[in-house]
Amino acid sequence: MTIRRNWRHKYKSEKSASVILPVHNAELWLDACLESVLQQDFQGTMELSVFNDASKDKSMTIIEKWRPKLEDSGILVVIGGHESPSPRGVGYSKNQAIAQSSGSYLCFLDSDDVMMPERVRLQHEAAVQHPTSIVGCRVRRDPPGSTERYTRWINRLAPEQLLTQVFTANGPTVIMPTWFCSRAWFSHVGPFDEGGQGVPEDLLFFYQHLRKGGRVLRVDQTLLLYRYHPQAATLSVLEKLEKTKTTQNAHPQVVAFCDVDENKIRKGFYCYEEAQERPKPRVPVLHFRAARPPFVLCVKLDLTGGEFEENLRSLQLQEGRDFVYFS
């Protein structure tokens, strides 16, 4: 007989967390990463679930070196992986690391990042109070000054913007390396897409999470050193294809484009030259003060010294009701 429990109650009484660590050729950063796992001040049961995705460097040697230190401190270490010629991808590795783990809560960690000692404790506290949320945190970028605009966006979004700015080019409003959630909720939403390189498995999961009624929460403390380096795993989408599809499908629903450029406003319209239909569609161009909501803002933020943001504030609109960001 199979006993089915509602996901809301399945892990309710357990105070245990699994750190989910996919690894692929991470020898340069693993010592600092694993040291940060050892230094956690979480008082519950903690385990480290490592999945090696066909590493060809000394990653596994480093992990085995740290295993007795971690286990002596009470942290169970679970190691899985494969030695195929090619890696299977981040989504596959995360799913495997989760499947072999046992904690009631999942703390996602990239192998090149470093956790602050209080990370698991503080995010666990928040996740217990918000069982249908993905819980993130603020980050400190390393090296300092890299991706400044993106880092400001990560750390400065207001609580309500964690839901209203989910369609920007920046991706999830709490970034994947900071995620913390209950296993029950992950099972309700997941798993990650395993399409491999080029598939934004975190963004796809994030949108599915929102479709299922999940919430987004950030612990407003810096709990992660978030590294930026040439070898960092970056997942790309075929933007050209997506932009073409978006333009082709959306233009009948667009009433007008808004601008401040006097030449564009004087011309009075934008013509989509790549359209197959005849005559080619023309969309009016208006001064932004002459337009009426709702607006879709397809503009990168923090690029004009605050001028764009000030123009937007002058309209006294409410984000999420009168406008959304989409880029």
Image (tube, rainbow, N blue to C red):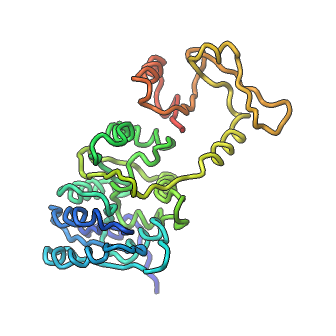
**Is residue 254 rendered to the left or right of residue 38?**
right
Question: Is residue 224 visible to the viewer in this orientation of the structure?
Answer: yes
Q: Residue at coordinates 25% horizontally, 72% vertically from top-left? A: 47
Q: Position of residue 109 (x, y in %)?
A: 32, 61
In front: 124, or 278?
Answer: 278
Question: Is residue 133 visible to the viewer in this orientation of the structure?
Answer: no
**Is residue 125 rendered to the left or right of residue 157?**
left
**From this viewpoint, which residue is outermost toward the right?**
278
**Is residue 232 rendered to the left or right of residue 15?**
right
Q: Residue at coordinates 48% horizontally, 51% vertically from top-left? A: 210
Q: Quadrant of residue 110?
A: bottom left
Instruction: Count numbered badges in the picture.
Output: 0
Quadrant of image for the C terminus: top right
In front: 139, or 65?
Answer: 65
In front: 220, or 128?
Answer: 220
In front: 37, or 112?
Answer: 112
Q: Position of residue 71 (x, y in %)?
A: 18, 77
**From this viewpoint, which residue is outermost toward the bottom?**
1
Q: Position of residue 288 (x, y in %)?
A: 57, 18
Q: Quadrant of residue 33?
A: bottom left
Q: Residue at coordinates 85% horizontally, 30% vertically from top-left? A: 279
| Rendered view: 194 above or below 211 | below
| Rendered view: 182 above or below 249 | below
Q: Residue at coordinates 49% horizontally, 74% vertically from top-left? A: 86
